[in-house]
Image: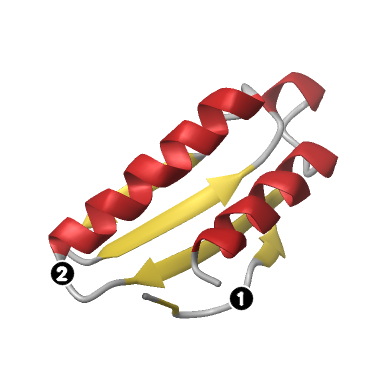
Amino acid sequence: MKAMSNWTESNNRLSQTFKFKNFIEAFGFMSQVAIIAEKMDHHPNWSNVYNQVTIELTTHDAGNTITDKDRTLAKAIDNLLA
C-alpha cells in the first residue's frame, strides 16, 4: 500500500490518490476509511478504479473549504498506511 503522492491542497480540497496491489486491497482500505469517517461524521468524496482510490476532503458545512476536520481525517487515513 503506497500513496502515489502526498496530500495536495487545491480548489479548497485536500486530495490524494492511493495505489494498492489489487482491487481487494483497495476496497479493504476504503472500508477502513469509511469506519473512521463515520465515527468522525465527516465523509470524503472518493472514487475507486481497480487498485486506485482517490480521496478529496473538504468541509461542506463550512462552505466547501479545508478545515481542521479535513486535516484530522487525512492524518487518520495516513495512519492506516503507517
- The one nearer the camera, 26 or 57, is 26
Q: Position of residue 60 (x, y in %)?
A: 68, 25
**Amino acid at pointer 2:** Asn
Query: Residue 17 in the image: x percent, y percent?
Result: 44, 67
Please say if 46 is above or below 24. Answer: above
Q: Mark 2 or mark 1: name the one nearer the start of the chain.
A: 1
Q: Which numbered disc, 2 or 1, marks the residue closer to the eye?
A: 2
Please tell me the numbered disc located at residue 53.
Answer: none
Q: Quadrant of the C terminus?
A: bottom right
Residue 22 tag number = 2
Find residue 53 and report its image quarter: bottom left
Q: Residue at x 46, y 33 (%)?
A: 35
The residue at the point 24 percent across, 50 percent down is: 27
**Left or right, residue 37 beside residue 25:** right
**In front: 39, or 15?**
39
* Residue lying at 63% horizontally and 52% vertically, measured from the top left: 76
Q: Decide if residue 12 is in sight here.
A: no
Query: Which residue position holds label 1?
Result: 6
Q: Secondary structure at mark 2?
A: loop
Instruction: Judge the density around disc 1: few (<14), some (14-19), many (≥20) Cα neighbours within 10 Å.
Output: few
> Residue 46's quadrant in the figure?
top left
Q: Secondary structure at mark 1?
A: loop
Q: CA distance from mark 2 to mark 1?
A: 20 Å
Q: Are marks 2 and 1 in contact (CB under 8 Å)?
A: no
Q: Left of 35 or right of it: where is 69? A: right
Residue at image coords 53%, 64%: 16
